[in-house]
Image: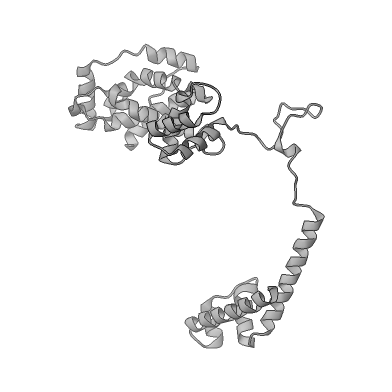
Amino acid sequence: MNKDLQAMDISLPISSLDAYITHVNQIPMLTQEEEQDLATRLQVNGEIAAAKPLILAHTKYVVKVARGYAGYGLPLGDLIQEGNVGLMKAVKRFDPKVGVRLVTFAVHWIKSEIHEYILRNWKIVKVATTKAQRKLFFNLRSMKKRLGWFTNEEVNFVAKDLGVEPKTVREMEMRLSSIDATFDYSADESDEKPGFAPVAYLEDKRYNPADLIEASDWSKQSESNLHAAMKDLDERSQQILAARWLSDEKSTLQDLAEKYNVSAERIRQLEKNAMNKLKKVLDYQES
């Protein structure tokens, strides 16, 4: 978006959402001639100030579109705000020479921004990521004639109507029917009457004694195997691996090249050969 247009102040001195909606509904619509003149001044002459009346005159349509998405359980004010972003993008791209009214052109941009906001915030986990899933998300609920699950015939009908696979319809139906749950109890639940939360029934295996002993034994065994495998290497290879991987202050290839008076590439080859030998010995010990 144009930085000047993005920075434009179109805020209104309104204290509440209801007052804002009442105010924008009272803003008079522009005539086609006024709209064409403002759009031409914006697009041809670069007059950023001409964008403000174009935007304000169409905010009432943003409210109307946003209200159509109230069923998703998201704040109406946020939906309107995102729709206003889409309106500003539409104003930036509106070409007065095409001959259509701005409101017709802007609907796509308003809905697009609202759709993106809903997909980001409707659930904790993204409910729709692919193009087919996005199409389904905003059509599936409106196509349901009842609260129950789709029959196979209904699944096939929806899939054919929307141009997607029946499997995709089933997956989206399951996602729409699922609910989010917090891991811990909510703030309004007391100790006397705890609610239902995963923390109450999911086992914490981090401190299982058997698992801790097994992990400790495995770590000690691996360390023992590593030291045994290192002894099979020549002294220089041991020193290179120790300097490169086991030291707190690891050496670079160039540091070791200067120490052993060889090239850095030679150090790299020695390191690689030593690592391959270690891997073979460790694989043999674990088999």
Which residue is at the front of the view, 212 or 21? 212
Percent x, y for residue 133?
45, 37
Instruction: Determine the image quadrant of residue 259.
Output: bottom right
In which quadrant is the C terminus drawn? Answer: bottom right
Query: What residue is shown at x 75% (from left), y 52% (from top)?
Result: 206
Query: What residue is shown at x 69% (from left), y 84% (from top)?
Result: 231
Would you say residue 15 is visible in this rendering? no
Is residue 23 shown above or below 246? above
Which residue is at the front of the view, 220 or 88? 220
Is residue 11 shown above or below 155? above
Instruction: Determine the image quadrant of residue 33.
Output: top left
Which residue is at the front of the view, 90 or 120? 120
Tell me: 234 left or right of 40. Answer: right
Which residue is at the front of the view, 49 or 127? 127
Percent x, y for residue 175?
54, 35
Percent x, y for residue 161?
38, 31
Instruction: Determine the image quadrant of residue 180.
Output: top right
Tell me: 196 left or right of 71. Answer: right
Tell me: 33 left or right of 171. Answer: left
In which quadrant is the N terminus drawn? Answer: top left
- Residue extending farthest front: 153
Percent x, y for residue 127?
51, 37
Query: What residue is shown at x 24% (from left), y 29% (from top)?
Result: 42
Would you say residue 18 is visible in this rendering? yes
